[in-house]
Amino acid sequence: MQKLKFYRIGDPLYKQNFTLCIGAAPAAKKYFSKVYNIQAPKAGQDAICVTLERGEESRSFIWVKGPNMGSLAHECLHRAIEVLDYCGVKLYPHNDEPLTYYFSYIFEQCYEVLYSSYKKEKTEKKNNEARKSKN
């Protein structure tokens, strides 16, 4: 079973830090069940956004099973709306800039981590295959 990778994402504006988790669904389900006693992700999900506590040391997570940008964007939008609501930022059609800027920040932070992790994993796999073929 693939291990989960955890990356803490800081939030300098609203102080609502969270953790990006990357890994296979069975590993995520086992982790969330064992550590937090919640049944997530559900069958068929490839990403979720979960908040158990708020604040700088919150227990909030975005989990993705892999480099699916659509799913990542979807969960980042959930996160942005949740944080803005918690912080009392009212969203209206004529006042959506807080959402768009905050979503962009969250997505860029997560994308950078996810892409770097995926790229590193691919490079390691390629190097391992090269070593095996030499032996």
Image (tube, grey):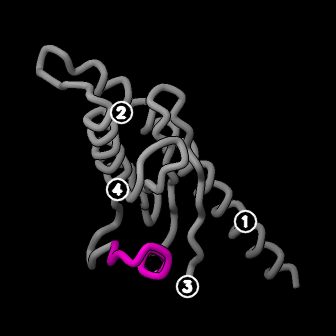
- Pick whichever of labels 3 and 1 is earlier in the sequence: 3
Circle 3: residue type: Met
Compared with 90, 15 (above or below) is below
Q: Is residue 37 left or right of residue 7?
A: left
Callout in the foreground (3, 2): 2
Circle 2: residue type: Phe
Label annotation for residue 103: 2
- Which quadrant of the rendered structure holds the C terminus? bottom right
- Which quadrant of the rendered structure holds the N terminus? bottom right
Q: Position of residue 53 (x, y in %)?
A: 41, 54
Residue on which the image places disc 3: 1
Disc 1 element: helix
Task: Check if residue 39 falls in the magenta segment.
Answer: yes
Callout in the foreground (3, 1): 3
- Pick whichever of labels 3 and 2 is earlier in the sequence: 3
- Pick whichever of labels 1 and 4 is earlier in the sequence: 4
Task: Check if residue 126 falls in the magenta segment.
Answer: no
Label annotation for residue 49: 4
Choose top left, top right, bottom left or bottom right for residue 83: top left
| Mark 1 to mark 4 CA distance (whole Å) | 29 Å
Circle 4: residue type: Cys
| Mark 4 to mark 2 CA distance (whole Å) | 13 Å
Magenta stretch bounds: 27-40
Determine whether label 3 and label 1 are within 8 Å by CB. no
* Within-10-Å neighbours for mark 1: few <14, some 14–19, many 20+: few
Determine whether label 2 and label 1 are within 8 Å by CB. no
Residue on which the image places disc 1: 124
| Mark 3 to mark 1 CA distance (whole Å) | 17 Å
